Amino acid sequence: MNWLIESALKMARMSDAEIDDISAKLPAFGRLAAALKKSEPTLSQAAPLIDQLFTELKQEWPDIVAVTPTVEELIEFANSKGV
């Protein structure tokens, strides 16, 4: 992580553990951003279908939000076991 960003996070009183966690996830954020940029033309064409999907998912959104922490915990557990 860039020292300037790390310093700003420390000044904002983010814990070292939180900073380490963010730093460890930066490569994944970079890959995701690159993939989204590459997919932007396709996503633009698919926008009407995406809008329809989001309309349908609104009803399920509370359940999605409810289970997301559990999914994250399962992913962290799997990663800790080298799966």
Image: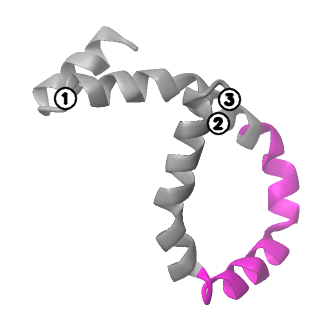
Query: Given contact means CB atoms under 8 Å apart, are the residues at marks 2 and 1 in contact?
Result: no
Q: CA distance from mark 3 to mark 2?
A: 5 Å
Q: What segment carries the magenta color?
A: 37-60
> Mark 2 = which residue?
33
Place residue 11 in its image quadrant: top left
Q: Is residue 63 left or right of residue 53?
A: left
Q: Which mark is residue 15?
A: 1
Q: How is the image coloured?
A: one colour
SS label for mark 2: helix
Q: Which residue sits at x=51%, y=28%?
A: 25
**x, y percent for residue 16:** 23, 22
Between 67 and 48, the one nearer to me in the picture:
67
SS label for mark 1: loop
Compared with residue 50, is residue 3 higher up or lower down, i.e. above or below? above
- Residue found at the far front of this picture: 81
**x, y percent for residue 53:** 76, 78
Between 74 and 62, the one nearer to me in the picture:
74
> Mark 3 = which residue?
31
Q: Amino acid at mark 3?
A: Arg
Q: Which residue sits at x=69%, y=78%?
A: 54
**x, y percent for residue 6:** 27, 18
Query: Given contact means CB atoms under 8 Å apart, are the residues at marks 1 and 3 in contact?
Result: no
Q: Which residue sits at x=49%, y=70%?
A: 65
